């Protein structure tokens, strides 16, 4: 259902607080998110430092953010699936596996970007 509240600073602040609650919940309950966050705290500044030009900086620093975003979506899918049906169901397992696959593909993208952009400089 669409929101009937007027848009303005109060609604923006509410959206920010809901996002902060989601990040906090992910940090508290999801080990994978914590690991990806720690890696991002290293990779993002490193990517901004090592990138030549804006496009390289965006690719090196932005792809870890994409992984964390996909992890948040995957964790949301898993939470909803577990809430709706705690017992095993093939479709529930498929939904969880597909969410995990999305995170994995973005991790491959991180490796590809870092390898293609920085590999030639190192070798």
Image: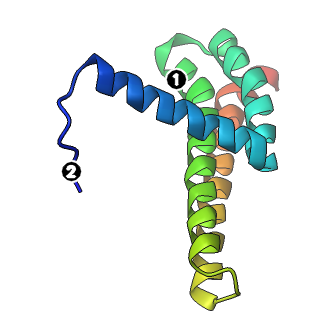
> Which residue is found at the position 64% from the left and 89% from the top?
89
Q: Secondary structure at mark 1?
A: helix
Hey, which quadrant is residue 80 in on the image? bottom right
Mark 1–mark 2 CB contact (< 8 Å): no
Q: x, y (%) of residue 87?
A: 70, 86
Residue under label 1: 58
Could one spot residue 24 in this view of the protein? yes
> Which residue is found at the position 78% from the left and 22% from the top?
42
Q: x, y (%) of residue 77?
A: 56, 63
> Which residue is found at the position 31% from the left and 27% from the top?
11
Instruction: Say left or right for 73 vs 37.
Output: left
The crowd level at tag 1 (other Cα within 10 Å; few <14, some 14-19, many 20+) is some
The crowd level at tag 2 (other Cα within 10 Å; few <14, some 14-19, many 20+) is few
Q: Secondary structure at mark 2?
A: loop
Residue under label 2: 2
Q: Nearer the viewer, residue 108 or 30?
A: 30
């Amino acid at each position: 259902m669409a929101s009937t509240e007027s848009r303005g600073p109060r609604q923006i602040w509410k959206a920010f607080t809901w996002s902060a609650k989601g990040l906090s919940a992910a940090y508290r309950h999801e080990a994978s998110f914590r690991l990806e966050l720690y890696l991002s705290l290293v990779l993002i500044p490193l990517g901004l430092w090592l990138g030549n030009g804006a496009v390289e900086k965006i690719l090196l620093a932005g792809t870890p953010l994409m992984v964390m975003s996909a992890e948040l979506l995957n964790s949301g899918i898993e939470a909803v699936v577990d809430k709706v049906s705690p017992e095993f169901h093939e479709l529930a397992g498929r939904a969880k596996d597909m969410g995990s696959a999305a995170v994995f593909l973005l991790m491959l993208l991180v490796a590809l970007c870092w390898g293609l952009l920085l590999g030639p400089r190192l070798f």
